Image (tube, helix red, strand yellow):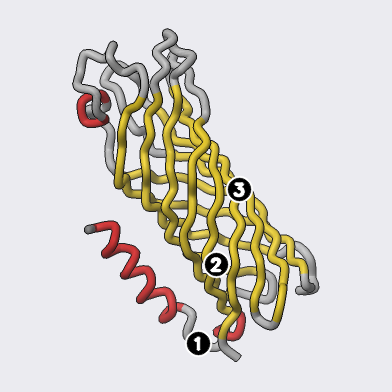
């Protein structure tokens, strides 16, 4: 229910933010794609990436002729596999609602049909699901995230860098292609015996959007 309320609040607030003199450059859209999810452990553990899903909506607001800010609401799947660790064959799969705030800069002086864009910013995420799969029988605790990862928090905070292409298709409509890297900076403290870990995602997304106003 909290996740639904946050998405509803995002949908209500973002059009209000776009109202004003820069409304002609305001854009709305949806995007989705695939992400390789992993975790950076601070101790002896190693992990392998999982192929997962990401998708959601965005609104882009103008700052200047070449700079914009983009607000997003994304459903993103995180996790990692420990199939190479003691041959247990297990994986941890988490799902989050992320709310990134991104600064976007167009390096080319002219706004042509194809627009390259550099992206950087931060996100705050809230866990909506977590489960263990595979060879979890060796765990002394119950076979659940609550049992195995007693100290983990439901929130995640991190940084995002990436690049995108916006291709104008017809009138105010455009297609966006994007690659980005998410790195969690909050120590997750999943395991009492571990020094913690940071979630990592390498994502490729495609989407469609429309520029509105004027």
Where residue 176 sits, quadrant-wise, is: bottom right
Q: Position of residue 52 (x, y in %)?
A: 49, 40
The percent position of residue 23, horizontal first and vertical second, equals 55, 84
* Lateral position of residue 108 relative to residue 159, left or right: right
Q: Quadrant of residue 17?
A: bottom left
Earlier sequence position, callout 3 versus callout 1: 1
Q: Which residue is mark 3?
A: 204
Residue 140 vertical placement versus 78 (above, below)? above
Q: Secondary structure at mark 1?
A: loop
Q: Are marks 2 and 3 in contact (CB under 8 Å)?
A: no
Q: Is residue 168 above or below residue 95?
A: below
Q: Which residue is mark 1?
A: 20
- Looking at the image, which residue is at 72% across and 72% down? 168
Label 3 or label 1, whichever lies nearer to me, is 3
State how far apart marks 3 and 1 are (Cα). Answer: 32 Å
Question: Which of the labelled discs sits on residue 185, or is there none?
Answer: none
Local SS, label 3 = strand
């Amino acid at each position: 229910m909290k996740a639904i309320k946050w998405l509803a609040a995002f949908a209500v607030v973002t059009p209000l933010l776009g109202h004003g003199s820069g409304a002609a450059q305001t854009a709305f859209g949806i995007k989705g794609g695939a992400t390789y999810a992993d975790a950076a452990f601070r101790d002896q553990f190693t992990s392998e990436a999982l192929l997962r899903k990401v998708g959601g909506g965005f609104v882009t607001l103008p700052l200047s002729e070449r700079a914009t800010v983009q607000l997003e609401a994304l459903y993103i799947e995180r996790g990692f596999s420990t199939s190479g660790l003691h041959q247990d064959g297990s994986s941890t799969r988490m799902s989050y609602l992320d709310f990134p705030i991104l600064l976007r800069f167009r390096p080319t002086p002219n706004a042509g049909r194809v627009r390259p864009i550099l992206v950087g910013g931060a996100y705050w995420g809230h866990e909506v699901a977590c489960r263990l799969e595979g060879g979890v029988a060796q765990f002394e605790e119950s076979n659940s995230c609550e049992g195995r990862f007693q100290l983990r928090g439901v929130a995640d905070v991190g940084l995002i860098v990436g690049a995108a292409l916006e291709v104008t298709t017809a009138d105010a409509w455009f297609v966006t292609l994007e690659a980005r890297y998410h790195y969690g900076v909050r120590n997750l403290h999943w395991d009492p015996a571990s020094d913690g870990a940071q979630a990592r995602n390498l994502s490729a997304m495609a989407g469609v959007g429309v520029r509105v106003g004027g």
